[in-house]
Image (cartoon, helix red, strand yellow):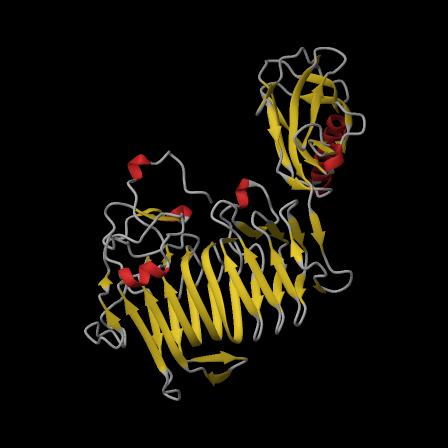
Amino acid sequence: MKLLKTFFKIGCILLLLSQLSCRKDFDSIVSNGNLSFSVDTLFLDTVFNNLSTTTHLLTVYNKSNNDITIPKIKLAKSNSKYRINVDGVSGTEIDDVLLLKKDSLFVFVEATASAQDTDTEMLYIDQILFDPNGNQQDVDLVTLVQDAEFLFPTTGTDFEITETNFTNTKPYVIYGNAIVPENGSLTIEAGTTVHFNENASLTISAGATLNINGTLTDSIVFKGDKLSYQFDQVPGQWQGIKIGENTNVTINYLKILNPSTGIEIIENTNTLTIQNTKIYNAADYGIYTQNTNLNASNIVIGQTGKSALYLQGGTYNFTHCTFANYWNKGLRYKDNVVISNYYVNNDVTANAPLQNADFINCIIAGTRTNEITLDKSEDEPVFNFYFKNSLIHLEKEVEFYDTDNTTYYQNVYLNKKTDFKDTSLNDLRIGLDNEGINKADITAASTVDLDITGTDRTVNPDIGAYQHIDFKTLEPKEEDE
């Protein structure tokens, strides 16, 4: 008997649910133009030619005390490049949408447009119309479409770059590993922007030449291909620049934004030159080297997930550089500058004589009391480093700490105030409270007579890549990143 009662109850419940699910006669009124929206204009991301935007959300509210029916929701253009999805229903035109009182519905919007589709100033514009045949309301849709040169492999992931010159006419978008072939060359003109897809990189093969010729007013930018502002500070969006053996590399006024490792240089006995270059939000390293010969000046490396510099053997001269790691995107397990005379590849340790690693008029700072690792192998006797007129974060417990030893240190300033403008945004300009003001070696400063902003430093030079400024005189905005 109990079993029969149970079956009877279940049957009644199923019958009731069946009746409710089949009901079509909701008491509702037709929309009378009193809908409310989360925005009046929905701005979608900036995208490249014929690539899709991310999906954006528009919320529609019924604030009345009546259930309403919206007779039609549609895109204004008959051949619109936008696509909409209304509470799970996709299309360009959706009929009889029920919206209960004091409730809301979601409209998801995305677009795939080409530069030829744009109206003015590369903007592609449309509208979502609500009840277009009665009490019409609308929300504008706007997205910026950029024309670009796309470089990608026809098969696999690697491909050789056939161009020898990148111009600033259009941005470039690279998919895969773009390779400057052995003994080939690539010159990049001032004002050029190069975007990289998630797994993309630029590789300079053995004996090849790379000339990055930015200027103070027209720097060159390497960054990911996600153009929405939401990705401005997201690390690891692309795989960086990889420089092979015995290459010829000159880099001037380059911004490297959001790579895994900004620049990786392996076994390069030629002297590479990097000047006036910024590397921000590298997921791993700013510059990573093995047995490299590098001259660098006016370099700024901000937040990195591991280290700004990881130097393993070679010859290095850093003048007027700022390495300041205030990583705020998780834990960081390495010091900001690591210097060693060996390296490990595939669990095999190899000696890498450190001929010299000289830091003149540099700032090495970060969230740690100690931001320098001096890692000497007992199997390799050559381990030469030198800090002069530099402001550094260094603990007494570190080996080679003795700052009275002029073989390694001269006029260093330990754990002093840096007074950076905004480390969270990698704005590493220094203010009036920086304790490296007027303390740079003037002879070295004369070889790099302008700071990274073009300010003269021949008189009373400051330590680091920037001459100090009074932050009160600045407009209320971050530098330029």
Res 375 quadrant in image:
bottom left
The reply to whether residue 362 is visible in this rendering is no
Quarter of the image where one finds residue 19: top right
Q: 131 or 364: nearer the eye?
A: 364
- Residue 90, image x, y percentages: 75, 33
In this view, 260 is above or below 129: below
- Residue that appears at 37% across and 76% down: 356
Q: Which residue is drawn at 64% across and 21% down?
A: 100
Which sits in the foreground, 400 or 14?
A: 400
Tell me if residue 438 can be seen.
Answer: yes
Q: In this view, does 319 lie to the left or right of 40?
A: left
Looking at this rendering, what residue extends furthest in the right direction?
A: 78
Q: Residue at x 27, y 73 (%)?
A: 398
Left or right of 160? Residue 357 is left
Of residues 416 and 168, the one nearer the viewer is 168
Is the residue 267 above or below the residue 13 in the image?
below
Quarter of the image where the N terminus is located? top right
Q: Residue 228: percent from the left, percent from the top? A: 57, 41
- In this view, which residue lies farthest toward the bottom? 379
**Between 25 and 202, which is closer to the camera in this rendering?**
202
Rendering coords of residue 386 (x, y %): 31, 72
